Image: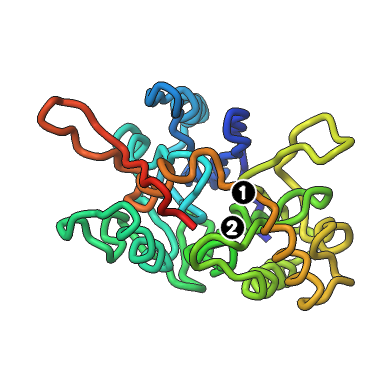
Amino acid sequence: MDRPRVTSFFDEATNTASHVVSDPETGTAAIVDPVLDFDPASGRTGTGAADAVIDHLAGAGLTVASILETHVHADHLSAAAYLKRRVGGTVAIGRGIVDVQQRFAPLFNLPPAIARDGSQFDRLLDDGETIHLGRITGRALATPGHTPACMTFVFGDAAFVGDTLFMPDFGTARSDFPGGDAAQLYRSIRRIFDLPAETRLFLCHDYKAPGRDAYSWETTVAAERGANIHVRDDIGEAAFVAMRRARDATLSVPRLLLPSIQVNMLAGALPDAEDNGTRYLKLPIDAFP
């Protein structure tokens, strides 16, 4: 089995792990779930997190083939558009992005000129579709449930699961966003669990479970199947769904959900500047469930 190189970058402000996965022989790379800095109090954006990725690419002599989004993130702004301008690469996401755009476009009252067909992305991936990474042939594995667009990207012995799974001591993603579904999430996780036991799983987030002092974003299929507190092998679908629905009912709306969704569902593109030269994000009042 191919063993790609993986270098990870953790943004503590959003608890997000981004990853660069590369073919050791050809130096061809993909960037997974990149972060654009954003301060909601001031409205300021920044590129510090993304620039760290660029510096790594240059230092390692890597060429970017793809920028992969595991889903439309609700907790950070994507740096996909910025990175595409700086280092190239095809921006790709699961075809479920169309569902997400159609659900959220009315919330932000997007004008008809803004397409709702996913065309802001360079490539929409279907379940089982191949993704070439130098000599390594990867594949997209549809794993919806957290959101309709969730994809797991598998390259050799490495899989990038987005928010679907967290570290075994923290559990699983919420499923109460529009288009989310706890039963579907359970079945998606079982698809991930069908990968070889030694498969390395790279996560999009970590929040340090109680009793753990360090952040962590890499685990294995075997570790998740044996010890995940929400969905290990001895927990069935009905028990998982009941737990997930009860837990989701206690969770607050993510702090950056509204700015994140309206940027990320358009491939990380910030709104065009208005006639005064300033860009604006919308904040719908009393509109989000």
Quick check: 129 left or right of 192? left
Question: How would you rate the neighbour count of disc 1 (Cα within 10 Å): few for under 14, some for 14-19, many for 20 or more?
Answer: some
Q: Quadrant of residue 155?
A: bottom right
Comparing 226 with 107, the one in front is 107
SS class, disc 2: strand
Q: Quadrant of residue 223?
A: bottom right
Count the marks: how many? Answer: 2
Whether tag 2 and tag 1 are in contact, CB under 8 A, the answer is yes
Q: What amino acid type should be assigned to the residue bearing mark 2? A: Phe
Residue name at image x 40 percent, y 63 percent: 100
Instruction: Please state the horizontal and vertical placement of residue 198, each as a whole percent of the image.
Output: 79, 58
Mark 2 lies on residue: 155
Q: Is residue 239 above or below residue 254?
A: below
**Mark 2 vs mark 1, CA separation in Å:** 7 Å
Comparing 172 with 247, the one in front is 247
Instruction: Please state the horizontal and vertical placement of residue 131, each as a whole percent of the image.
Output: 46, 61
Mark 1 lies on residue: 4
Q: What amino acid type should be assigned to the residue bearing mark 1? A: Pro
Residue 92 seen in render: yes
Comparing 11 with 253, the one in front is 253
Question: How would you rate the neighbour count of disc 2 (Cα within 10 Å): few for under 14, some for 14-19, many for 20 or more?
Answer: many
Residue 160 seen in render: no
Residue name at image x 77 percent, y 60 percent: 221
Instruction: Please state the horizontal and vertical placement of residue 219, each as a whole percent of the image.
Output: 76, 49
Residue name at image x 43 percent, y 43 percent: 260
Comparing 151 with 212, the one in front is 212
Instruction: Please state the horizontal and vertical placement of residue 190, each as a whole percent of the image.
Output: 72, 72
Per the rendering, the mark at residue 136 is none
Q: Is residue 133 above or below residue 35?
A: below
SS class, disc 1: loop
Q: Quarter of the image containing the N terminus?
A: bottom right
